[in-house]
Image: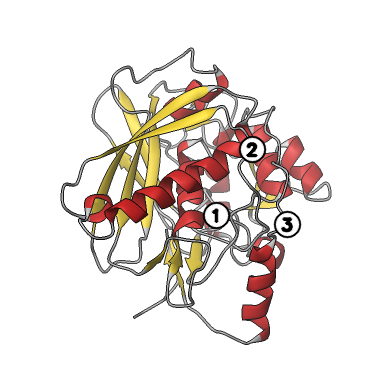
Amino acid sequence: MDNSILSLEKKRNNSGKVKSILIASTLIIGSAAQPAQAALSFTFNYLSPSQGFDDPTSGAARKTALNEAADLLGAYFSNYTANLTYDVKSFSNNTSTLASAGSSMFLIPGSFQQTAVQTKILSNGATDINGATADGTIDWNFFKAWGLTDSVSNSEFDFKSVAIHELLHSFGFSGNGHADGSGLAGKTPGTADTWSIFDQFLTDASGETLVSPGGIFDTSKLAALTGGSGSVLFSGDNAKAANGGFGVNMYAPGTYNEGSSISHLDDNTTAFSQMIMTASVSSGLKARALSAIEIGILKDIGYTQIAAPVPVPASIWFMLSGLVSLLGVSRQRKSV
């Protein structure tokens, strides 16, 4: 099979008062940690009968893997209490996208908005802006081979790692910008638009913010969006502290990639290339643990009580990843 690098993409649903932001994801190599007694719970509504997660043969194992991935992520949020609901769809297409996930937010030009999932977590379940509608959505591509357990071959993509990546997009780890400088509402660049909390911390290489406090993108900084490594930084205090005092390079390739650009860590920065929230992922076992930089970003966007769970002796992810490198296994990457 073709194990090319799959990229991460963000999809937008422009209907209604609330817009959905859906982003495809990427994976990395990291150390493993057991879920703590997470106060977050996840309810998945499976909407594709007889296929994917409801496949008569593999569906049960796929659901188990998704629940286990959610528990791994939830362990970082044990200081919060909320039940998060997701509508989950399955498909099978030979495309570069492995999966996508997202959450809706209000369209209020001139503001920085939380996702529905983000609001629910940070309010400890007290505020549900979606009401009876699911807090988030997940779309999963089962055309590719998936490794569902802790044993993932070099011809499979790491299901749990990708799931953690995608869920984090719904948690608010995502920008709303377009190539022309417009935001989520698609307003004329240079006028007030709707942005994510994440966008509030994006700067150019000099540390100047891309979007003003009034929600207006500085169109003089358009070139930064396609300026390559170091042209767009995440400059929140916690992220910078975890990165030696420097802003964190965001993915900003020479050609703007809708749904991936400025919503992921930079794949081409060596120090970040093996982190979960990069823009693409290759096959094989990857990390299921967040780096200090990723935790710092999550703190900056509001999750001040996030804490790394206690690692189990199975920091086997690092060992296996190192073994793969030593053996010289070469894999192409795909977006998720």
Amino acid identity at mark 2: Ala
Residue 164, image x and y in percent?
Answer: 51, 48
Which residue is under mark 1?
223
In the rendered image, is residue 115 in sight?
A: no
279 left or right of 91 in image: right
Which residue is under mark 3?
313
Q: Where's the N terminus, which quadrant?
A: bottom left
Q: Earlier in the sequence, mark 2 or mark 1?
A: 2
Q: Residue at x 68, y 84 (%)?
A: 326
Does the CB distance between marks 1 and 3 fall below 8 Å? no
Residue 170, image x and y in percent?
Answer: 45, 38
Q: Quadrant of residue 145?
A: bottom left
In the depicted structure, whether residue 124 falls above or below residue 280? above
* Disc sitting over residue 36 in the figure: 2
Amino acid identity at mark 1: Ala
151 left or right of 179 in image: right
Q: Residue at x 34, y 44 (%)?
A: 138
Q: Earlier in the sequence, mark 1 or mark 3?
A: 1
